Image (cartoon, rainbow, N blue to C red):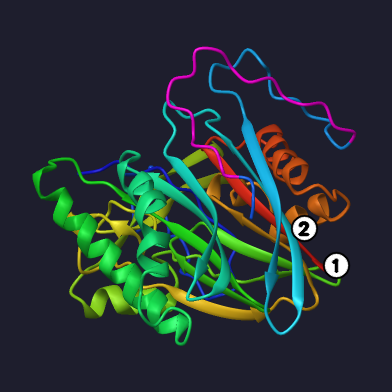
């Protein structure tokens, strides 16, 4: 069975309480985007910016790298946006995060795609999503006229195609997917797993996705109705006779700490790739942040928005978020995309 180390994230839905120690004895046209580095021979050097106060050591062989671009979309009114991305292996032994930023013309309309994919059990699922998810979505015949239905169908088809390719693989693997699609004045967010999309509107943090965790009451019910189960995997540490700390998380089948994901063939049909979708008007949205849980494990939505708010350059903002998450002790891969909007 896989050993997947995922931490809890902030959410607004009801969640289960950890079991008591008595009942449960102790038991884890735009600039093209760059590809994540596999085994770089020399680390890229960080650029000094006035907003950067925490520097990731340049001696790290897999140092933070980033990029970005700027573009226009034409809908009922023109919208100018800039985007930046940054990705960092951090304290993990390997890099399992991928991201995608892509601007394409679909049926005569300019469309922008942004996504963060956080792999577990290896990087191959996340890399597959980077290479195929948006391609499948933009190729869907109803993408423009019925975007939400097209997203649902494209996500499910991509998962099915990936699982078909996985038939020869013995080791199970999977990935989250947090995505945002810009079509004219519309922003359509689709999420699978515990990466997250957060918007800033008038200085306030607005969640555009809710993490898929096994202890969400609706997710637990869905899993149990499908014949699955969730159990607490963790331990209790006593600092004194009167003080104890419970560490651990709820896991699907005792294995996976997210309740929806691409891949994870051994946990189907309990772990599904059905996206939850939320649509927003761009008007009034200052920026959005899409990030893996390596960021959200140590930064609240409010904290992340406050960090980005005064950094006008999207690439610099994405780098600053990663540096802050790393300085606060994130032990995971950290990847984020920042998209800023302004009226043309």
Secondary structure at badge 1 equals loop
Q: Position of residue 302 (x, y in %)?
A: 76, 60
Label 1 and label 2: CA atoms lie apart by 8 Å
Q: Position of residue 76 (x, y in %)?
A: 71, 85
In-front residue for pair 297/262: 262
Label count reads 2
Q: Position of residue 330 (x, y in %)?
A: 60, 37
Q: Left or right: 229 with respect to 343?
A: left
Residue 277: say if magenta.
Answer: no
Question: Is 92 placed above or below 166 here?
Answer: above
* Image point (43%, 78%), residue name: 143
Q: Left or right: 176 with respect to 10?
A: left
Q: Left or right: 193 with respect to 238?
A: left
Residue denoted by label 1: 203
Q: Residues within 10 Å of mark 1 (few under 14, many from 20)?
A: some
Tell which circle, 1 or 2, labels the residue nearer the N-terminal end: 1
* Image point (54%, 70%), residue name: 210
In-front residue for pair 119/149: 149
Kindly identify which numbered label has been placed on residue 305. 2
Residue 46: say if magenta.
Answer: yes
**Over which residues does the magenta segment extend?**
32-50
Q: Quadrant of residue 326?
A: top right
The secondary structure making up most of the magenta span is loop
* Image point (32%, 48%), residue name: 125
Callout 1 touching callout 2 (CB < 8 Å)? yes
């Amino acid at each position: 069975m896989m050993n997947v180390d995922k931490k809890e994230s902030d959410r607004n839905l009801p969640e289960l309480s950890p079991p008591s120690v008595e009942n449960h004895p102790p038991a884890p046209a735009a600039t093209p985007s760059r590809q994540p580095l596999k085994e770089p021979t020399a680390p890229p050097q960080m650029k000094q910016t006035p907003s950067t106060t925490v520097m990731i050591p340049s001696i790290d062989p897999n140092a933070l790298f980033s990029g970005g671009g700027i573009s226009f979309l034409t809908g009922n009114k023109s919208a100018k946006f800039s985007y930046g991305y940054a990705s960092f292996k951090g304290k993990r032994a390997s890099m399992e995060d991928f991201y995608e930023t892509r601007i394409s013309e679909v049926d005569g309309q300019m469309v922008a795609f942004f996504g963060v994919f956080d792999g577990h059990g290896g990087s191959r699922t996340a890399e597959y999503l980077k290479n195929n998810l948006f391609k499948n979505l933009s190729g869907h015949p109803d993408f423009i006229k019925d975007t939400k239905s097209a997203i649902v169908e494209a996500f499910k088809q991509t998962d099915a195609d990936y699982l078909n390719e996985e038939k020869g693989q013995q080791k199970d693997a999977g990935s989250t997917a947090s995505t945002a699609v810009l079509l004219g004045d519309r922003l359509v967010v689709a999420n699978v797993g515990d990466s997250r999309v957060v918007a800033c509107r008038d200085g306030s943090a607005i969640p555009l996705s809710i993490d898929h965790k096994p202890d969400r009451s609706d997710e637990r019910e869905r899993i149990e109705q499908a014949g699955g189960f969730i159990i607490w995997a963790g331990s209790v540490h006593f600092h004194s006779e009167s003080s104890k700390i419970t560490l651990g998380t709820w896991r699907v089948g005792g294995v996976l700490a997210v309740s929806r994901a691409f891949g994870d063939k051994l946990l189907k049909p309990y772990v599904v790739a059905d996206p939850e979708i939320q649509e927003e008007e761009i008007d009034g949205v200052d920026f959005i942040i899409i990030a893996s849980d390596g960021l959200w494990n140590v930064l609240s939505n409010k904290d992340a928005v406050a960090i980005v708010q005064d950094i006008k350059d999207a690439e610099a903002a994405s780098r600053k978020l990663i540096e802050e998450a790393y300085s606060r002790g994130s032990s995971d891969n950290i990847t984020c995309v920042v998209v800023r909007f302004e009226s043309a």
